[in-house]
Amino acid sequence: MEYDIEHRPSYALLTAELNQGEQLQAEAGAMVSHTDGIEIETSASGGVLDSIKRKAFGGESFFMNTFTAGRPGHVTLAPPLPGDMVHYRLDHESLYVQSGSFVAAHPDVDIDTEFGGGKTFFGGEGLFLLELDGSGPAFLSSYGAIESRELDPDESYTVDTGHIVAFEGSTDFSVRKVGGLKSTLFSGEGLVCEFSGPGTVWLQTRSPDAFLSWLVPNLPSGDGGGRDGGFSIDF
């Protein structure tokens, strides 16, 4: 499978070239277009129970689309948020992905949720992270641009939980507060994740949570209580 990612880093578009018989599984709703001869099958990937886990705990869609090339062609995919995309080839290994960052992968890559205990709960990632396991190409997305950090053995690196895209299974991590209680509540940073190498961590330059924290107070309200007086809409 050959691929190309265009319009980076703000409005990334993935073009995956499929030879006859090749397949690609993708998050429902990610497709932009495809050539003639590409067949689409929608299913609860991994079975109903695995799909329920991904939806309830991993933040992903219940269904997955599998694209099969009846003859050579391509399919284009894009993430829901404006941002970047990155390719990662798994080789009998695991990759942990934050909710919402998975776009597509080869069918030989198993997609499941992995219980992370309290450290993921307090990190704002929910009790589950998506675990990609196996061998084959995978494609991840971000809100904003993607930055990678390769960590040496025993090297540590701290990341705000809202800016994590993915990390290799070889890394270890723990969640902690930013300083004391005052810093946690008023610094605007909240909780951070401290990674320990070896391994690679991928970050996104924007945080959806931070954007929502800015956006919601500025939305007009129906009672005219918005920042600028607001307005009301009757239906």
Image: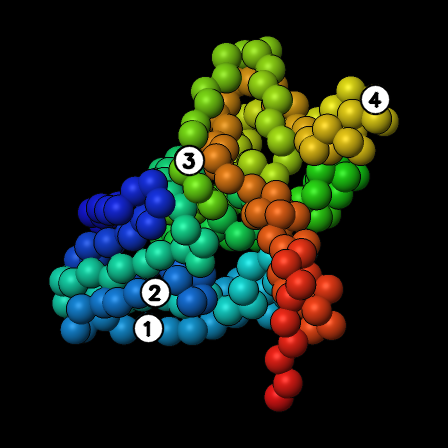
Q: Going from the N terminus, do you reach mark 3 or mark 4 first?
A: 3
What is the secondary structure assignment of the residue under circle 3?
strand
Reading the image, the residue beneath label 2 is 31
Q: Are marks 1 and 2 in contact (CB under 8 Å)?
A: yes
- Looking at the picture, which amino acid does disc 1 mark? Ile
What is the secondary structure assignment of the residue under circle 2?
strand
Res. 189 image quadrant: top right
Cα separation between marks 3 and 1: 29 Å
Residue in the image at 63% along x and 71% along y: 231
- Looking at the picture, which amino acid does disc 4 mark? Gly
**Residue 215 in view (yes/no):** yes
Image coordinates for residue 48, horizontal then vertical, percent: 60, 70
Q: Is residue 181 above or below residue 213?
A: above
Labelled disc at residue 40: 1
Structural crowding at the residue carrying mark 2, measured as other residues with C-alpha within 10 Å and reported as few (<14), some (14–19) or many (≥20)? some
Reading the image, the residue beneath label 3 is 146
Cα separation between marks 3 and 2: 21 Å
Q: Going from the N terminus, do you reach mark 1 or mark 4 first?
A: 1
- Looking at the picture, which amino acid does disc 3 mark? Ile
Q: Going from the N terminus, do you reach mark 2 or mark 4 first?
A: 2
Q: Are marks 3 and 1 in contact (CB under 8 Å)?
A: no
Q: Going from the N terminus, do you reach mark 1 or mark 2 first?
A: 2
Q: Nearer the viewer, mark 3 or mark 2?
A: 3
Quadrant in which the C terminus is drawn = bottom right
